[in-house]
Image: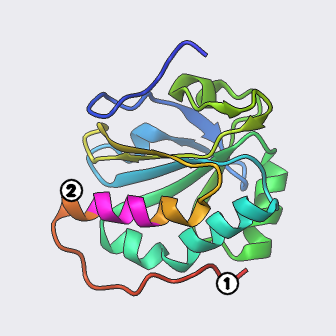
Amino acid sequence: MGNKVEIGTPAPGFSLPSGDGHQVSLSDFKGKKNVVLYFYPADESRGCTAEACSFRDNYEAFTEAGAEVIGISSDSPESHRNFSAHHHLPFVLLSDEGKRVRDLYGVPSMLGLLPGRVTYVIDRNGIVKHIFNSQFQPAKHIEEALKVLKSIEGPLPIVEMRSPGI
């Protein structure tokens, strides 16, 4: 793992397959939307399900902030398709089976084994505005990202923070 993305630097570009088989590139959003890019360990695990459902339950707040949410793990596109359908996720999940993008962003592993949980807020110009790394506070990723989007986009409509309905 040679790279480490830092706040204020351009987010590394990538293109990965989604659960529906389409290639999604970070450049698809440049100049159009902020991106909340979150790396998570695995589909259907307890913490990852809570995190995904919290992003889902607060998705309207993200879209109102001009942002798109993108989740990335090393699970297969088929696993993502099933996970997304099971929990009615309105955002895209991308498959990084070779962990190339995870390494490109410098996402750490816990104890060298468990893939890390890191969220990046990237503005419309492709610049990293915030990085939040917490393996054991999945819901805090949503709170942190919304706070940063508010600072980028100005005051957001008041939206009640919702707990994940798993």
Neighbourhood count class around disc 2 (C-alpha, 10 Å): few under 14, some 14–19, many 20 upward = some
Label 1 to label 2, Cα distance in Å? 28 Å
Which amino acid type corresponds to the residue marked 2 in the rendered image? Answer: Ile
Disc marking residue 152: 2
| Magenta stretch: dominant secondary structure | helix
Image location (x, y in percent) of residue 132: 46, 47
Q: Quadrant of residue 8?
A: top left
Q: Residue at x 63, y 79 (%)?
A: 164
Image location (x, y in percent) of residue 75: 79, 45
Which structural element holds mark 2?
helix
Give left or right: position of 50 versus 64.
right
Q: Residue at x 30, y 28 (%)?
A: 9
Residue corresponding to mark 1:
165
Please say if 164 is above or below 43. Answer: below
Disc marking residue 150: none
Q: Which residue, as the protein is rendered here, is positioned at the far left?
A: 154
Image location (x, y in percent) of residue 105: 52, 28
Give left or right: position of 149 versus 118.
left
Which structural element holds mark 1?
loop
Residue 6 part of the magenta-drawn span: no
Neighbourhood count class around disc 1 (C-alpha, 10 Å): few under 14, some 14–19, many 20 upward = few
For the record, the magenta segment spans: 143-149
The quadrant the N terminus occupies is top right
Tell me which label, 1 or 2, sits earlier in the chain.
2
Which amino acid type corresponds to the residue marked 1 in the rendered image? Answer: Gly
Q: Residue at x 79, y 56 (%)?
A: 43
Q: Circles 1 and 2: CB distance less than 8 Å? A: no
Rendering colour mode = rainbow
Q: Residue at x 73, y 80 (%)?
A: 166
- In-front residue for pair 2/72: 2
